[in-house]
Amino acid sequence: MALSTTSSVEKDTKPRLATRDIWNMSVGFLGIQAGFALQNGNASSILQRYGADVHELPNFWLVAPIIGMIVQPIIGHYSDRTWTRYGRRKPFFLAGAIAACFGMMLMPNAGALTAFLPLVLMGAGMLMIMDASFNVAMEPFRALVADKLPASQRTQGFSVQTALIGIGAVIGSWLPWFLANVGGVTDTAAEGLIPDNVKWSFYIGGFLLLAAVLWTVFTTKEYTPKEQQHHAGGLDTEIEKGGLGLIFKDLLKMPKTMRQLGWVQFFSWFGLFSMWVFTTPAIAHHVYGCAIDDTTSKAYSDAGNWTGIIFGVYNLVSAVFALLLPSIAGRIGRKKTHAIALVCGGLGLISMYFATSPNFLLLSMVGVGMAWASILSMPYAMLAGSLPIHKMGVYMGIFNFFITIPQIVSGVINRPIVQHLFGNNAIYAIVMAGVFFLLAAASVVLVEDKDDPVGIRSQSTLS
């Protein structure tokens, strides 16, 4: 059934939701981020165990942003324009969750499928399946928050979502370490094999992802097309005819605020991609003293496990800091809040170069966690106020271009930079990531945030 739409940005008359309902609609993101955290913390070491060299890692990681750039606008486009008996967004993120769970079961077992492809390519294929599924599940959650919440609750909604993302990421990041050090599961394996603690982490993470998404499916009611029409001011026009080509038309007509946020996102996600790809080899060599090409020693396994711990720390910090963001933004504005958080993240990444012990990295991750909380909430809170309600899904998907393109650029240029300029010493890629966070902070100044409550109050006072 096609949804009716309007031709411009509509008046937002949605009722305020109870705090419990705001949390329920984002519980699924907890499970999705647990899966993402397992991927982010372990994919590089898994691929290295499958035979990839350190400077080749960005090539494999390019799969993720390329798939995201393709999948998210398409999912957003179709979720905007359809309605089923099960809802508007829910069928999409449930299908993505089922596929992601399947991919997580296969990723650490790629060795069983080497009759079809070489081991390292099979591992990359499983990474592709996982990431495509994560993107299918994730995109509708952003649109769901914007669908359901009025402007006065939007910052709170994305902050709650970020807090749950942080909790899920802590679980995913710490699972391998917990199973090895508390559960007694072995964390070493022969060349070409994946340790049991990593395998069981992926199994548990897949189950958690599916269970969390089902929680949201059964506890959250979406607005019907008639209710959406009512909240859009009662306007009723025919849906714009056309297929996927409309995505490109919408891309060309993107709001000014969205274009300005693109630069902030570019620098932020270039840095994040570098951090995720290179943290394990960076600290293995720079902090644990491993040789650059070492992937089988106990010290390398310890570095991989510690990467999970420090990634869990920055996600734990982000979960707590996210709950403070509405209050901070309410005092100084969303732009200043985001800029300060990005500066803290940049300094945190740069400080890793000066680490003298693994514990030092915990302090570095405090700043990264503050930046991560803001990256996952402030840009979306600023963006949603500039978007038409009936195109929320497709524009949230198009906005993902500003997440995926910098990751693609990072993946392409990081290989020759790390190999030839840095001599495969990954710690310098981490420092470079910190510099890009600082550039992102500087770019926030250019953003026009029209419905920032602080800006609105200031204008009212002046008038």
Image (tube, rainbow, N blue to C red):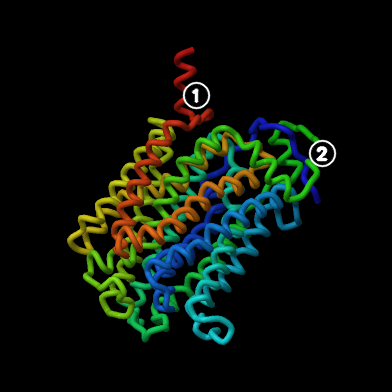
Could you tell me which residue is drawn at 37 percent across and 86 percent down? 190
On screen, residue 126 versus residue 417, left or right, reads right
* Amino acid type for the residue under numbered disc 2: Glu
Q: Which residue lies furthest to the front in this view?
A: 420
The foreground one among 266 and 455 is 266
Residue 44 horizontal/vertical position (percent): 41, 69
For label 1, the residue is 456
Residue 64: horizontal and vertical position, in percent? Answer: 52, 61
Amino acid type, callout 1: Ile
Left or right side of 25 for 458: left
Residue drawn at the location 69% of the way across and 36% of the way down? 231
* Mark found first going from the N terminus, 2 or 1: 2
Q: Mark 2 points at which residue?
A: 238
- Classify 10 Å Cα crowding around label 2: few (below 14), some (14-19), many (20 and above): few
Residue 207 showing in the rendered view: no
Disc 1 crowd, CA 10 A, few/some/many (<14, 14-19, 20+): few
Determine whether the residue tagged by mark 1 lies in a helix, strand or loop. helix
In the image, residue 327 above or below residue 159: above
**Is 172 left or right of 212, judged from the image as shown?**
left
Q: x, y percentage for residue 145?
A: 58, 46
Q: Can residue 295 be seen at all in this image of the molecule?
A: yes
